[in-house]
Image: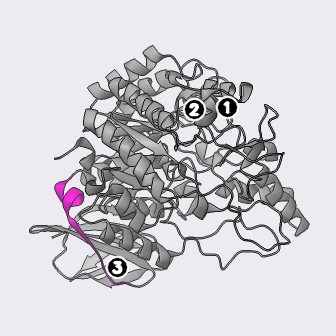
Amino acid sequence: MRHWYDQAIIYQIYPKSFQDSNNDGIGDLNGIRKRIPYLKELGINAVWLNPIFVSPQVDNGYDVSNYFAIDPKMGTMEDMDNLIKEMHEAGIHVIMDFVLNHTSDQHPWFQDAIKNPESIYRDYYIFAGENNQRPNNWGSFFGGSVWEKDPAGTGQFYFHLFDKRMPDLNWKNPEVRHAMTEIAKYWLEKGIDGLRLDAFIHIAKADLRQNFPVNSKDEEPVIAEPFFANLPQVQKWMRLFCEEIKQDYPDALLLGEAASANVNLAVDYTNQDNHLMDSVITFRYFTEDQSKIDPSFLSNYQPKPLDWVKFKQNQTIWQQTLSGISKPTLYWNNHDMARLATRIAKNDIQARSLAMLMYLQCGIPIIYYGEELGMKNLQFEDINDFKDDTVKEFVTSAEKAGKTSKEALLMASKTHKLPARGPMPWDNERNNGFTEKEPWIKGRKLDKVNVADEIADDSSMFNFYKKLISLKKEQLFQEGNYYLWPTSNGSYVYERNLKDKKALIAVSLSQEPIELEVGKEFSSERLAAGEYDLTAGKLRLEPYAGVVLEN
């Protein structure tokens, strides 16, 4: 059975930063509606919205306090209904972020659980321990322990894999599984076309009595990921969820965030015989080169180049292993990482070449808002703008090693996820047309790009992406086989073929010109970035250039 998402080209919108329609400094649903013509012009056919539910915004909407209502800062339910309707009229599918591992501590379930230890909602969450003793030494992704004292004063603790204000749900409880399925169905009944399943790999936990073995002298909490990621029960519980969704909504896209999953787990999660997801997003693509790290201070926010050899290996393994199983997701950046133009691309030419490299492979492109303009991370000049204690620890560590505060903040701005969530620049007016008030996020804009200028310039990044997206829609790049050519570390060259049609995508990763023997078969240019020369089967690529050739 063919589905709409077999040929999806997804555009990720971070609603708070896309377009403010009521001038409160925060992007909203009506702002997105206003920009539907822009999305249609770009050529994408699906939009993924980061969370828009009612939330205290501890984690920018991933802490949900009401799954059945729109956060007032984003708009109303009527606004959402209109957005879905108008997106569909424009031929654009709508995918919502669905947070199913945890809720906000302000959610009525949790509030009832801590006010009444006998509440039925007590078992909707994970409470353990006694006599004020934590059950184990597991550490939270957001720092410290996964255990926080029960506010009811029972001597127990509740489990939170992320912020302490985001308690994990207890998926062992069938009532929890039923409730989350009903929430998903509510939104699908409203007309959305898919769900991005946030952090689903964490819904199962190992025996809570089990410490993670460490040096006996070390009493600090430890990230015990094998005990709360990709456990077998995840597939069991998600199968029940996915089967029920697909039974009622067989054309709904179920896109799982499987951050730490290896390619074999990705096969398990997306094999149709397993009745789970249609595709997953992995964080395993981008292996960084650790050789240039300064050991005198913390490494977490030191800029690190991509290890291109490992990248080639990662891409090829995912392409070949998932062949015939499912389509991998193809992305360079998202709300959880620094932007392509900041993190990897040395210049505009390389940004274009890398876009060709990634999105013309087999898979589902996910383009992060503003990427098509060449947007860069913001530069934060106040440590408090990061809203992250780990940045404070990094800056303190760097200062002790002799770096200035300014140098440390610049490094963090290049590598942290929050500066990648800057406002979409629409024009040359105040705040680039995003809002007339002060934007919700502070930071200095390091690029000069905006939509109005880019659309008017035939040679712009926007118009390059528009051509690239149009090319991606062709059958060869949707269904063709993938084969990576054996080339030097300075290039990335692969072939797509379908029946008698062939295409060669050749990209330079080098700051020096490179030459490749490609044969006389590939002679027709479809798309190019930078300068190249093709003569008698020999291809010369200038620094960071790329080209798509067909037979």
Write down the quadrant of residue 42 in the picture: top left
Give the residue displayed 33% in from the left and 37% down from the top: 245
Asked whether residue 211 is drawn in magenta, I would say no
Q: Is residue 47 visible?
A: yes
375 relative to 280 in the view: left or right: right
Q: Which residue is mark 3?
A: 540
- Mark drawn on residue 440: 1
Circle 3 Cα neighbour tier, 10 Å, few/some/many (<14 / 14–19 / ≥20): some
For the residue marked with disc 2, what is the amino acid? Lys
Label 1 sits on a secondary structure element that is loop
Circle 2 Cα neighbour tier, 10 Å, few/some/many (<14 / 14–19 / ≥20): many
For the residue marked with disc 1, what is the amino acid? Trp
* Residues at marks 2 and 3, CA–CA distance in whole angstroms: 44 Å
Give the residue displayed 61% in from the left and 42% down from the top: 168
In the rendering, at what x and y percent does residue 496 appear?
23, 68
Pointer 1 with pointer 2, Cβ within 8 A: yes
The stretch of residues the image draws in magenta is: 474-487
Vertical position of residue 264 compared to residue 162: above or below: below
- Mark drawn on residue 16: 2
86 relative to 111 in the view: left or right: left
* Residues at marks 1 and 3, CA–CA distance in whole angstroms: 46 Å
Q: Nearer the viewer, mark 2 or mark 3?
A: 2
Observer-nearest of 399 and 85: 85
